[in-house]
Amino acid sequence: ADGCYVVPGLIDYHVHSFFGGTKGGMHPDFMLPVGITSIVDQGSAGYADFESYYRVIASNSFVRSKAFLAVSPTGLIIPGLAEEAYEPKYINETRIASLVKKYPDYIQGLKVKISNGYHDYDGYGGADALKRTVELADKLGNGLRVYVHVVNPPCSIDEIVDTLRPGDIFGHMYQGEADTILNEDGTIKESVKRARERGVIFDEANGRLNYDLEVCKKALEQGFLPDIISSDMSLLINKNYAGRYVRSFPYIMSKFLELGLSLEEIIRLTTEAPASYMGMTGQIGTLRPGAFADVAIFKLSDITHVQLDAHDRPLECHKLIVPQMTIHDGMIAYAAIDFDL
């Protein structure tokens, strides 16, 4: 590994991995070549199809995983269609409670979307759906977190962050539709600052439609960094994974080098930090003795490329993280063809 960086196996805290069960579900093991050894699936399955996801995908993949359970009955079958029903009347408390009790070590929390819709998507739930989800998580206990997808919200950001508890997660923190984490003058909202101070977690969760370059730049200028960098990766050919927006996890990580984060900080936000939120500190996200032997090796190459936000605003980047080898649990899972074994 001379001339390379050797880091813990990457952890992508926001992916959609219900391969075969959802339109964009990407099989977890497809992610090994880019250095990912652990993931968290963010609500691809709801209480009606979670057993299928767990038995068919999660239990039969090398990549380690945990998941958030969508409070929508069928999760993310086809984005933007009626199957994503997050209104409180569709939240089946009995079924959700049964699954949380059955899989306490696997289900990290509950996933809810609140949005008026954006681009070609229809709307999801509103503030009432978020409040109902938080109430249910409180009732079920066991440290259950709530992860909220926020894009083009139907209510204020103030109302959203004030509803969240310490340990809950605000997803797509740099989205730019309707109300954002910024005031009209570009400063960070006081409610957002208070939320972070009391322990609300902010996930970058890039995605294809959920990232606004200008919001991100203004937030970073004020020192409002993400608590997690994640990809929101799915298999939407020519739009997300294989297209110009997400491409791969290291591709998104490379963008933050251009935006001023240090490589050390980027690695921490994609290894150690998500490992702690998964309750796996010391097991993954580290190279310390006794941990699972998950290792990612990459080169940092001088490759100029342009990355786009949801509005096709370009950011010219000059460094690219290029995967060379992935080791999963002590076994070589991927090696670049020109990497010297």
Image (cartoon, grey):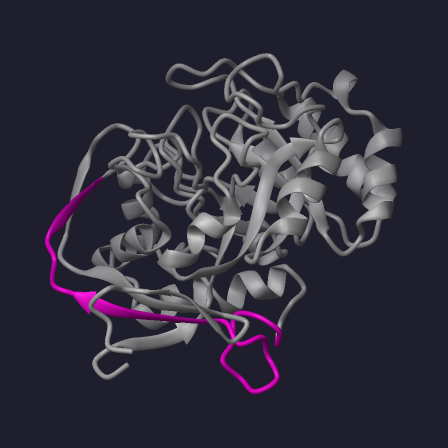
The picture places residue 253, in percent across and down from the top left corner, at 32, 56
The picture places residue 199, in percent across and down from the top left corner, at 62, 56
The picture places residue 288, in percent across and down from the top left corner, at 53, 84
For the residue pair 29 and 202, the one nearer the viewer reads as: 29
Residue 72, by quadrant, is top right
Q: What is the quadrant of the C terminus in the image? A: bottom left
Q: Is residue 220 left or right of residue 146?
A: left
Which residue is at 40% across, 54% downward? Answer: 224
For the residue pair 1 and 339, the one nearer the viewer reads as: 339
Q: Is residue 233 left or right of residue 330?
A: left
Judge whether 75 appears above or below 39 on screen: above
Is most of the magenta stretch helix, strand or loop? loop
Whether 283 is among the magenta residues is yes
Judge whether 76 appears above or below 188 on screen: above
Judge whether 190 appears above or below 78 on screen: below
Residue 187, by quadrant, is top left
- Residue 8 in view, yes or no: yes
Q: What is the quadrant of the N terminus in the image? A: bottom left
Whether 234 is among the magenta residues is no
Residue 279, by quadrant, is bottom right
For the residue pair 28 and 178, the one nearer the viewer reads as: 28
Image: magenta residue range: 282-307
Which residue is at 62% across, 60% downward? Answer: 277
